[in-house]
C-alpha cells in the first residue's frame, strides 16, 4: 500500500531549494562573445521585426483562405495566378478575390493573402492553380 504523497506550496518549495542549494545566481552584463553557457535573466526583444514583411515558410501559392472554403478532393477551387513573388524582392502587389501568387520559401507575401497553399497540394493548369482542400488562416509575421 502506498503512502499518500504530501505536497507543499510552491513558495515553500522554492524556499527549501534556496536554503539547500549552493547556487546563487548573479545577474550582470557580459559581452555576447563570452556569453556561451550562460542563461538570460530577462527576455530579449528585437526593436523591429526581421524580416519586416510577412514571408512564406514554404514553396506554394499565396492565397486568401476565404477563396478556398469550398475546395474538396475531386472538386478543386481554381484561382487565377497573378504572378510570382521572387526571393529578395519586395513587392507592392495585392491579391484580390479569386487570385493566387506563386511564392518561394522566404519570399515576401502580397497584401491580401492570409495563407499559403503548398505546392504539393496544388494543381496547376496554365495561368490557374487548383486547390483540393480548404485551408486555415495563418497569422503574424511569416504566416506561422
Image (cartoon, helix red, strand yellow):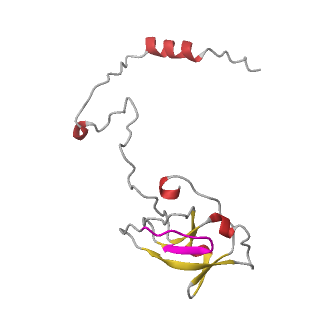
The residue lying at 40 percent from left, 34 percent from top is: 43
Residue 61 image position (x, y, % from top left): 54, 72
The secondary structure that dominates the magenta segment is: loop
Position above or below: 50 against 57: above
- On the picture, is 6 further left or further right than 29? right
Position above or below: 21 against 138: above
Residue 26 image position (x, y, % from top left): 32, 22
- In the image, the segment drawn in magenta is 92-102
Q: How many marks?
A: 0
The residue lying at 42 percent from left, 16 percent from top is: 21
- Viewer-proximal residue among 27 and 8: 27
- Viewer-proximal residue among 11 and 37: 11
The residue lying at 40 percent from left, 73 percent from top is: 86
- On the picture, is 69 further left or further right than 17? right
Q: Quadrant of the N terminus?
A: top right
Q: Quadrant of residue 8?
A: top right
Q: Quadrant of residue 133?
A: bottom right
From this viewpoint, which residue is outermost toward the right? Answer: 1
Q: Quadrant of residue 75?
A: bottom right
Residue 68 image position (x, y, % from top left): 67, 69
Position above or below: 8 against 116: above
Residue 38 image position (x, y, % from top left): 32, 33
The residue lying at 71 percent from left, 67 percent from top is: 69
- Viewer-proximal residue among 58 and 5: 58
Amino acid at each position: 500500500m502506498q503512502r499518500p504523497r504530501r505536497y507543499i506550496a510552491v513558495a515553500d518549495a522554492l524556499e527549501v531549494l534556496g536554503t539547500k542549494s549552493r547556487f546563487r545566481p548573479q545577474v550582470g552584463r557580459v559581452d555576447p562573445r563570452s556569453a556561451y553557457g550562460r542563461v538570460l535573466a530577462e527576455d530579449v526583444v528585437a526593436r523591429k521585426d526581421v524580416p519586416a514583411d510577412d514571408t512564406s515558410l514554404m514553396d506554394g501559392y499565396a492565397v486568401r483562405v476565404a477563396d478556398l472554403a469550398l475546395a474538396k478532393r475531386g472538386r478543386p477551387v481554381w484561382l487565377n495566378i497573378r504572378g510570382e513573388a521572387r526571393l529578395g524582392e519586395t513587392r507592392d502587389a495585392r491579391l484580390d478575390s479569386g487570385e493566387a501568387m506563386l511564392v518561394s520559401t522566404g519570399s515576401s507575401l502580397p497584401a491580401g493573402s492570409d495563407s499559403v497553399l503548398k505546392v504539393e497540394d496544388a494543381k496547376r493548369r496554365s495561368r490557374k492553380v487548383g486547390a483540393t482542400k480548404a485551408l486555415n488562416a495563418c497569422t503574424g509575421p511569416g504566416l506561422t
